[in-house]
Amino acid sequence: MHGDLGGEDVRVDATDGHLCGVLDWDGCGPGDPAVDLAALRTSLPAPVFARLARRLGARARDLARAGAYAATFALQEALLDAERDDPAPA
């Protein structure tokens, strides 16, 4: 898995939606690829994510796991802020 995947890491051809490349692989390693799908799901517009997920061959069970991971992102961020003693978001 990429490990730090976001919309800014994905290059898609604007004319046909073809996936051209993925950048920033320094955090890659073994893991559930649905985590990467979750990150894309939260950082890309829904139609772009749906098209990309189809092109990547994501199955319904992958997308279901991605939804579960995405649902935890706000809590993960809050816990990280608490560990860093950051103030609550405005």
Image (cartoon, rainbow, N blue to C red):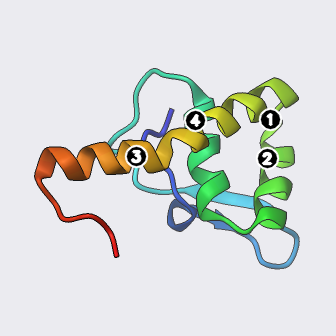
- Give the answer, above or below, for where 26 lies relative to 66: below
Q: Are marks 1 and 2 in contact (CB under 8 Å)?
A: yes
Above or below, comparing residue 75 to residue 90 in the picture: above
Residue under numbered circle 2: 53
Q: Is residue 85 above or below residue 76?
A: below
SS of the residue under disc 3: loop
What is the spatial separation of the Cα atoms under label 1 and label 2, in whole angstroms? 5 Å
Q: Residue furthest left?
A: 85
Q: Earlier in the sequence, mark 3 or mark 2?
A: 3
Mark positioned earlier in the residue sequence (1 or 3) = 3
**Amino acid at dot 4:** Tyr
Question: Mark 2 against mark 4, which lies toward the viewer?
Answer: 4
Residue pictured at 34% horizontal, 40% vertical:
27
Q: CA distance from mark 2 to mark 4?
A: 16 Å
| Alpha carbon separation for disc pair 4 and 1 | 15 Å
- Precedes in sequence: disc 2 or disc 4: 2
Q: Position of residue 90 (x, y in %)?
A: 34, 76
- Mark 4, Cα crowd under 10 Å, few <14 / some 14-19 / many 20+, is some
Q: Quadrant of residue 66?
A: top right
Find numbered disc 1 in the image and state the secondary structure of the residue it sits on. Answer: loop
- Label ID, residue 69: 4
Q: Label 1: which residue?
A: 58
Front in this rendered view, residue 53 or 23: 53
Compared across the picture, whether 61 is left or right of 27 comes to right
Q: Nearer the viewer, residue 18 or 40?
A: 40
The amino acid beneath tag 2 is: Ala
Task: Estimate the x, y position of residue 55 in percent, counting from the top left.
Answer: 84, 47
